[in-house]
Amino acid sequence: MTTTPEASTEAHLEELSGDECRRLLSLSAIGRIAFVVGGLPMVLPVNYRLLEGESGLWVLLRTRPGNAIDEAPEQVAFEIDGVEYEQRQGWSVLVRGVLHHLDHNEVELMSERFDPKPWPLGDRTAWLAIKPRSVTGRRLHGAQMDWAFSPAAYR
Amino acid sequence: MTPIDQQSGLVASLEDVPRAECLALLATAKVGRVGLLVDGRSEILPVNFALDGETVLFRTGEGTVLNQASLTIVAFEADHLDPVTRAGWSVLVQGTARDIGDAIDATSERLRQLSLVTWAPGRRDRWFEVRPDKVTGRRLRVIPDSL
């Protein structure tokens, strides 16, 4: 039998439900935030916590005042992803929304209940929260996981 | 640097990583994320990628809405962050993404060797390459305080 160079990829994308996206968001602690500053796109990893409250979902971030994330514009994208090698699947959740800076009162409220506890310590006292406009997710099944760049898949 | 644990005297350090080391770290990642502006909105998507020297290569799926003119400034990020050891790194590449088409001879040979994706016959893959203008990286370590 000849071994063909092509693995039977048979990869297929499964769209995740809102509940599943929220579940994945609640389980992870690291995501990546993307935004454009001065025409240059940035993607940076951040610690985060998912807040599910009366006002809906919020993605809470804590960062150092004045750093790139603290100076990001309103419109951001936020992503988490993971790989389950045994199950041969990958997943990705994409949040698109508006970045808010929290004021002192809001910080008091949040820090008691939800503190993202960022790893690099020091002066990380700027609190931000993303209010999602859309939350979508994909699971990729396949013998060979192969994420292709396809924004259309996330609409 | 601030002690993160007074009892064990551990210290978290965040250090910049030189460009050459950034690329070495990138080579160990399996998935990266592409960030760019599409129709005025920030997008960020995970991709499998290959590193060809300093050039990042990734495949686009069918129906991509990537700019047909295919000259787009993108960010490409990869990281390895371990929640248990609290150590890791993150690398950010910023550069121009260029559509290198679906008939890429010299490059396709390199791609096969890079084992990015096995090629299915007749598949119309479109490949993009990002030549970095800027490469930055950070390494996060938890190290013992002075002994």
Image: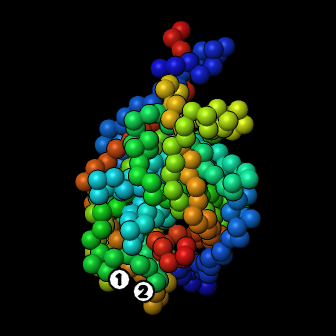
Q: Secondary structure at mark 1?
A: loop
Q: Amino acid at mark 2?
A: Arg
Q: Residues within 10 Å of mark 2 (few under 14, many from 20)?
A: some
> Residue A143: x and y, percent?
63, 72
Question: Looking at the image, which residue is at 31% across and 43% down?
Answer: B19
User: Pointer 1: what residue?
Assistant: B102
Check the picture and name the quadrant holding the N terminus of chain A: bottom right
Q: Is residue B35 left or right of residue A15?
A: left
Question: Looking at the image, which residue is at 46% across and 84% down?
Answer: B63
> Residue A153: x and y, percent?
54, 76
Q: Quadrant of residue A48?
A: top right
State whether residue B72 is above or below residue A40: below
Tags 2 and 1 touching, CB below 8 Å: yes
Q: Residues within 10 Å of mark 1 (few under 14, many from 20)?
A: some
Q: Is residue B104 left or right of residue A111?
A: left
> Residue B4: x and y, percent?
59, 22
